[in-house]
Amino acid sequence: ARVLILNGPNLGRLGVREPEIYGHASMADLEREGVRWGNDLGLAVQVRQTDDESTLVGWLHEAVDTRSHVVLNPAAFTHYSYALRDAAAQVVTSQLLLVEVHLSNPAAREAFRHYSVVAGIATGTVAGFGFDSYRLALEAISNKLLG
Ligand code: DQA
């Protein structure tokens, strides 16, 4: 099965950006690890990042058209982008899996991070485990596909 790991704004700055919150590893590291975890699970994984809302919406449309499951870190869009939510909803209603992930635990941070507009349509959410959030999301997808 195909899985797109999609990352939203500022996540290209991983390693440089607030390392005490987001860690010292980079997006290039996540790309490498994500593909490797996918190989171990028999999933064809692609890792992408953009700061642009319309690009992210387009990738979700692509997931529907190519029958790809999605691991989505919407970053700040999590908290306010109804366009992203609507695009993510189309993935789930197409009988594809969509796991929302976060490096940090937004529920333990500022109040504006406590609400996710994506959570209500996602298959499930993994938050608070750094890169392991993504690995756990891939494992959850693999397990669910195996039934
Ligand atoms: C984040 C949490 C969001 O609140 C924040 O805007 C991010 C990253 C995370 O992975 O912990 O950019 O999605």
Image (spheres, grey):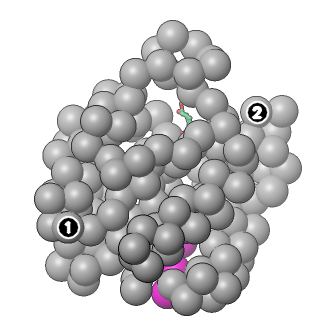
In which quadrant is the C terminus drawn? Answer: bottom left
Tell me the residue at 41%/47% (across/down). 124
Residue 44 spot, x, y in % from top left: 49, 87
Disc 1 residue crowd, few under 14, some 14–19, many 20+, Cα 10 Å? few
Asked if disc 2 is less than 8 Å from ligand 1, the answer is: yes
Disc 2 residue crowd, few under 14, some 14–19, many 20+, Cα 10 Å? few
Q: Amino acid at mark 2?
A: Ile
Quadrant in which residue 92 is drawn = bottom left
Indicate whether residue 99 is drawn in magenta. Answer: no
Q: CA distance from mark 1 to mark 2?
A: 34 Å
Which label's residue is closer to the chain start, 1 or 2? 2
Name the mark on residue 124.
none
Picture layout, residue 99 above or below residue 80: below
Q: Secondary structure at mark 1?
A: loop
Q: Taken as a whole, is the magenta stretch helix, strand or loop? A: strand
* Front: mark 1 or 2: 1
Residue 72 spot, x, y in % from top left: 44, 55
Q: Is residue 69 left or right of residue 43?
A: left
Whether pointer 1 and pointer 2 mark residues with C-beta atoms closer than 8 Å, the reply is: no
In which quadrant is the N terminus drawn? Answer: bottom left
Residue where numbered disc 1 is placed = 95
Residue 132 spot, x, y in % from top left: 71, 55
Q: Is residue 18 left or right of residue 73?
A: right
Residue where numbered disc 2 is placed = 21
Which stretch did the figure color magenta? 44-48
Tell me the residue at 46%/61% (across/down). 71
Q: Amino acid at mark 1?
A: Gln
Q: Is residue 130 visible?
A: yes
Ligand 1 rendered quadrant: top right
